[in-house]
Every structure is written in C-alpha cells, then in structure tokens.
C-alpha cells in the first residue's frame, strides 16, 4: 500500500502542519498527482500526470485530498475527483487520514505539530463536552470563541485550520496586551515568575514604561533567575522591584506551561491567579480543570497567531 496526494498546496501555507506531521512520523508520499506534469517534483515528491498515475496507482493505495482550491481554481479539484473515480479509488481527506492513524495508534507512537500531544489525548478529547461559555468559566465571549475554534481543530485533527488565526500578531504583542488588561483590572501588583522569564519580564517592563506610576513587585523562582543568567541584573535595574524568592501570599503566577501552574493549585483552596502559555493548545484546559478539582475559576484565552503552542491563558479566581 502506497500513499499519494491528489494535488498539493502551491505557494501556500495551507498544508504546513500536515507537511510537518509527515516529517515527524517519517511518512513518505509516493507521488503527487496533477492533470499534467509541469515540474518533476514538489517538495522533493515526484509529480505524476494522469497518464502516468493511471498505470502506477492501484486499488488499495491511499490518495489524500491535498488540493484546497481557491475560488478561481475549482476546476482542478473537480478534475482530480473525476480522475480517481475512473480508477475506482476513493480519495481521503487529510484530517480523516490522520484521525484513522490516531485510532490505530494505541502505543502513542505518533508525533504531532503540537509538542506533548499524544493520540491518547486526542481520542480522550472526543469524550469531553464542547466548550461552554458559562459552565467552563470563560471570562469573555472572545475566550469562548477561541476555545471553540481550537477544540474543533483538535477534535478533527485538521491543524491546518490554525491559519484562521493568522492575524499579523505576535505572541509577545498579545502577552503585553494581556498583562496590560489584567493590570487595569487591579491584578499583577505582585507576581511570581516560575519559569520562562524573558517574555514575562519583557511584558512587565513594557507595562512599566507605558504606565510609569504602576507599582510592581516581581519575584523570581530560583530556576527562573538561573535561566536569565547575566540578564538578571538588567531586569533588576530596569524594574527596580525584582527579587529571587519563594512565592509569597497573594501573587499572580507567571509560567510558560500549564503543568507548572497546575503544580501550584491546591485542592480545596481558591485557584491562584496566573498568566501562562498553554503549550498543548486547548488540551491544556483539561490540565487546569483536573488540578482545580471542584474549585471555581474564570479563564481568559488569547490565540495570537497560527502556532498552537502560543495559546495564552489567564486564570482568575
């Protein structure tokens, strides 16, 4: 059994995540089928015209629908569909192909463009309810919309739909906006950086520049201070309120991962406020939910760009 592509994404990011999935799992395509062979190969994969493909492909081969036409190029998709129908070959969507591999992957051997995500995680997601605005504690409608869209992407395994978040924004810009918004709500007077210090200290420094009268007390965990190395002194002088210390009472935690935030949540206690990255995208909602147990919380979500691991969350109590 061989795997072929019906069409390809030319000069377009439409298949970027799928291409990464193929590389991560050492899956090779035997060819890309087009009505005519214009180049000899695309991305190092042989291009087959209809005549060559007719003699090379057989029933039982897998043909993936990799042509995602624009409004002015619908005829190519129709030509490809009609051609494979004459061969008695049923083409398969990319997302459906990945879903079938996930269903078979009981050893969690597959790797995904989102670090730390396993086939078991994605199968378990199917049993979870869809994101709910009130019941799941989303701070605002925007957070619920982000969660709903990311949940649909993860459930369908169509990671290329992350292109809907292509909005000329950077994670740094979005983090600065989140920090400024929370500060305006009266939060972030005292913060404790657990890890990944640079983006958070830069956001706090930007806030200090934009709002010079803001009073900030910044604590660094020992590991975060060590990660800064010689830059520690720069931020100490720039912020004027930075100390390496254990977390004191009433701090807002800052971290590069949901796992680190989950580790400071205590069953039976009010959820600690936090700002953090959800590196496993929407799947990290479950990490926070399990760590919080029955304690109520509110959560803000911001997806700055097409990187699933750049999802920013703010946990409010």
Image (cartoon, rainbow, N blue to C red):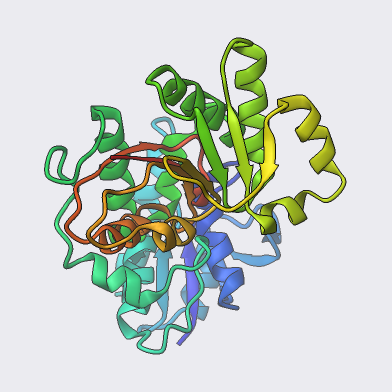
Relative side of 132 to 189, left or right: left
**In the figure, is residue 250 to the left or right of 297?**
right
User: In the image, what residue occupies the spot 45% across and 62% down?
Assistant: 259
Q: Quadrant of the N terminus?
A: bottom left
Q: Position of residue 289 (x, y in %)?
A: 26, 58
**Vertical position of residue 198 compared to residue 210: above or below:** below
Compared with residue 17, is residue 85 higher up or lower down, i.e. above or below?
A: below
> Which quadrant holds residue 299?
top left
Q: Is residue 76 visible?
A: no
Give the percent coordinates (x, y) of residue 159. Answer: 42, 54
Between 119 and 209, the one nearer to me in the picture: 209
Image x and y of residue 56, in percent: 52, 79
Q: Nearer the viewer, residue 23 or 264?
A: 264
The residue at the point 14 percent across, 57 percent down is 129
The residue located at (27%, 73%) in the rendering is: 123
Task: Say which residue appears at 25% left-offset and 65% top-offset.
Answer: 125
Residue 26, image quadrant = bottom right
Q: Is residue 60 above or below residue 275?
A: below
Tell me where residue 24 sits by quadrant. Answer: bottom right
Above-or-below relation of 1 to 234: below
**Left or right of 194 in this view: 231:** right
Residue with the most extreme right position: 230
Q: Position of residue 171 (x, y in %)?
A: 57, 36
Q: Nearer the viewer, residue 130 or 5?
A: 130
Q: Is residue 62 visible?
A: yes
The mark total stands at: 0
Q: Quadrant of the C terminus?
A: top left
């Amino acid at each position: 059994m061989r795997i072929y592509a019906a069409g390809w994404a030319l000069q377009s990011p439409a298949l970027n995540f799928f291409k990464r999935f193929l590389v991560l799992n050492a899956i090779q395509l035997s060819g890309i089928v087009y009505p005519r062979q214009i180049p000899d190969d695309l991305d190092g994969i042989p291009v087959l015209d209809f005549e060559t493909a007719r003699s090379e492909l057989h029933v039982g081969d897998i043909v993936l629908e990799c042509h995602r036409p624009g409004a002015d190029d619908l005829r190519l998709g129709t030509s490809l569909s009609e051609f494979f129908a004459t061969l008695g070959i049923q083409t398969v969507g990319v997302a459906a192909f990945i879903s079938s591999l996930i269903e078979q992957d009981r050893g969690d051997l597959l790797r995904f463009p989102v670090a730390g995500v396993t086939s078991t995680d994605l199968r378990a997601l199917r049993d979870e309810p869809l994101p709910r605005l009130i019941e799941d504690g989303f701070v605002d409608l925007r957070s619920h919309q982000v969660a709903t869209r990311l949940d649909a992407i993860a459930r369908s395994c169509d990671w290329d739909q992350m292109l809907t978040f292509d909005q000329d924004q950077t994670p740094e810009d979005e983090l600065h906006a989140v920090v400024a918004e929370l500060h305006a709500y009266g939060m972030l007077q005292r913060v404790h950086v657990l890890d990944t210090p640079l983006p958070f200290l830069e956001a706090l420094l930007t806030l200090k520049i934009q709002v010079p009268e803001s009073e900030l007390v910044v604590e660094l965990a020992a590991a975060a201070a060590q990660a800064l190395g010689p830059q520690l002194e720069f931020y100490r002088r720039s912020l004027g309120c930075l100390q390496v210390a254990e977390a004191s009472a009433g701090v807002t935690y800052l971290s590069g991962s949901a796992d680190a935030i989950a580790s400071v949540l205590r069953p039976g206690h009010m959820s600690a406020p936090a700002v953090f990255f959800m590196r496993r995208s929407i799947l990290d909602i479950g990490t926070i939910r399990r760590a919080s147990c029955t304690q109520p919380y509110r959560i803000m979500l911001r997806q700055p760009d097409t990187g699933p691991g750049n999802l920013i969350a703010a946990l409010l109590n």
